[in-house]
Amino acid sequence: MKKIAALPLTKQRDSTCPKVFGVSLLELQRQGLSKNGIPIVVCNIVEYLTQHGMSQEGLFRVNGSMKMVEQLRLQYERGEEVELVKDGDVYSAASLLKLFLRELPDGIITSALHPRFIQLYQDTRNDMQKENNLKELLKELPDAHYCLLKYLCRFLTRVAEHHVENRMNLCNLATVFGPNCFQ
């Protein structure tokens, strides 16, 4: 599989537009680039993929066109309205979502909580106790991170419901999104 390389945006970005990629979730909220705690770029991509990509085989495993992903990214960075139906395709939209998550400065699961999540995973207590501890640990995420994680989990659950067509069961989705959530 090809990696998606980020091309330099310095020459192409309009300095009056707020940056979208590589910006903290809190900063996106401050700039008005979030809706109900979810970055607008994520909402747009998830809505598009929900309508057009749920049965697409290899969703999130097949990379989109690097050129198209970069063009879509630039449109968001310039503050342009992006119509994924017209300007993109399913694989490029999926790649753009992964790129956005990968470029978050502190990931969805903040680095400060990484050791505690790992410790919880390695805990040998019963599942009920682990579940309660996980719920408590999730409450410690900053609100913007918690909102995005919840939104993403709901979406990925819907993707997994179509695993017969798209070949993306929960295990495959965890393999793809784990590194994007834990940086």
Image (cartoon, rainbow, N blue to C red):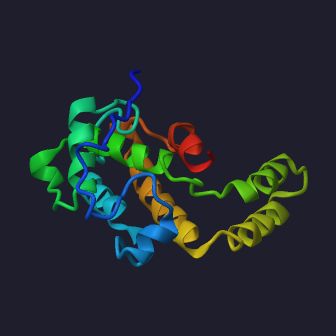
Pick whichever, 106 or 84, lies toward us: 106
Q: Give above or below for 80 relative to 163.
A: below
Taking the image as shown, residue 176 lies to the left or right of residue 114, namely left
Q: As drawn, which residue projects farthest toward the left?
A: 86
Q: Looking at the image, which residue is at 76% across and 54% down?
A: 117
Could you tell me residue 90's position as x and y percent?
24, 42
Taking the image as shown, residue 117 lies to the left or right of residue 1, namely right
Q: As drawn, which residue projects farthest toward the top?
A: 1
Q: As drawn, which residue projects farthest toward the right?
A: 125
Pick whichever, 119 or 144, lies toward us: 144
Residue 65 visible, this angle: no
Could you tell me residue 47's position as x and y percent?
27, 61
Q: Looking at the image, which residue is at 44% across and 48% down?
A: 160
> Quarter holding the C terminus?
top right
> Quarter holding the N terminus?
top left
**How many numbered discs sit on the rendered protein?**
0
Query: Residue 93's image quarter?
Result: top left
Residue 145 visible, this angle: yes
Taking the image as shown, residue 133 lies to the left or right of residue 100, namely right
Pick whichever, 136 or 159, lies toward us: 136
Could you tell me residue 8's position as x and y percent?
34, 37
Q: Looking at the image, which residue is at 56% across and 37% down?
A: 175
Could you tell me residue 143's position as x and y percent?
58, 75
Pick whichever, 89 or 68, lies toward us: 68
